[in-house]
Amino acid sequence: MGPLIRLETNLTGDRYLNILSDHLHSFMSIVHSDGLGQFQQQDNATPHASRVATKWLQEHSCDFRHFHWPPKFPEMNIIEDIRDAFLYAIENRSPPPRTPMDLWTVLKDEWCELPPRYLQTLVESMPHRVVALLSVRGSPTRY
């Protein structure tokens, strides 16, 4: 897992490009210096599929691999499960976060405390998710 990045505005293609170049590239070069790292782009949201981001990812394809996400299948992305875990943790926090800074602190804490086994289980669920998607011919799945 890479660093948790806080955005204080809407995500655009240019802002996403900054995240890729400022955070993703350095993280991948440290953790996967062999170039065998795999980056799973969140989905095909407009900023993720922007020309500038696509070009940057192509230019850095020798540094790490990029998993091309199928369009309109966000339920297949494990980030949805992580988001749900965050929501659960925040809802059960006592006292609950009251300010944006409190919320950011809670999110950073929860990000660091995600159990590696939980994350590994999500990664290992991908073949089952793909089979489920294929069996319903692209219709929504239970994921």
Image (cartoon, rainbow, N blue to C red):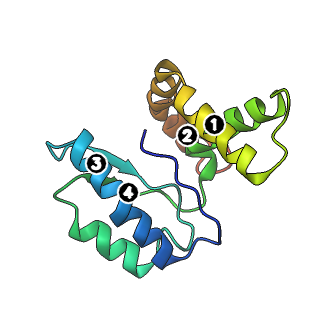
Which residue was labeled with disc 1? 81
Residue at point 31% right, 76% down?
55
Residue at point 46% right, 22% down?
116
Residue at point 56% right, 35% down?
111
Which residue was labeled with disc 3? 28
Relative image position of residue 22 (x, y in whole percent): 36, 63
- In three-dimensional space, the C-alpha distance between marks 1 and 3, rounded to whole angstroms, equals 23 Å
Residue 62 lies in what quarter of the image? bottom left
Which residue is most to the top? Answer: 117
Is the residue marked by circle 3 packed among few (<14), some (14-19), or many (20+) residues within 10 Å?
many
- In three-dimensional space, the C-alpha distance between marks 2 and 4, rounded to whole angstroms, equals 20 Å
Task: Identify the element where label 2 is drawn.
Answer: loop
Q: In this view, does 104 lie above or below 110?
A: below
Task: Identify the element where label 1 is drawn.
Answer: helix
**Amino acid beneath label 1:** Asp
- In three-dimensional space, the C-alpha distance between marks 3 and 4, rounded to whole angstroms, equals 9 Å
Q: Do the residues labelled 2 and 1 touch (CB within 8 Å)?
A: yes
**Of callouts 4 and 1, the N-terminal one:** 4
Relative image position of residue 102 (x, y in whole percent): 74, 44
**Of callouts 2 and 3, the N-terminal one:** 3
Let me know if residue 67 appears in the view: no
Which residue was labeled with disc 2? 78
Residue at point 58% right, 56% down?
6
- Quarter placement of the C terminus: top right
Is the residue marked by circle 4 packed among few (<14), some (14-19), or many (20+) residues within 10 Å?
some
**Amino acid beneath label 2:** Ile
Relative image position of residue 114 (x, y in whole percent): 55, 27
- In three-dimensional space, the C-alpha distance between marks 2 and 1, rounded to whole angstroms, equals 5 Å
- In three-dimensional space, the C-alpha distance between marks 2 and 3, rounded to whole angstroms, equals 19 Å
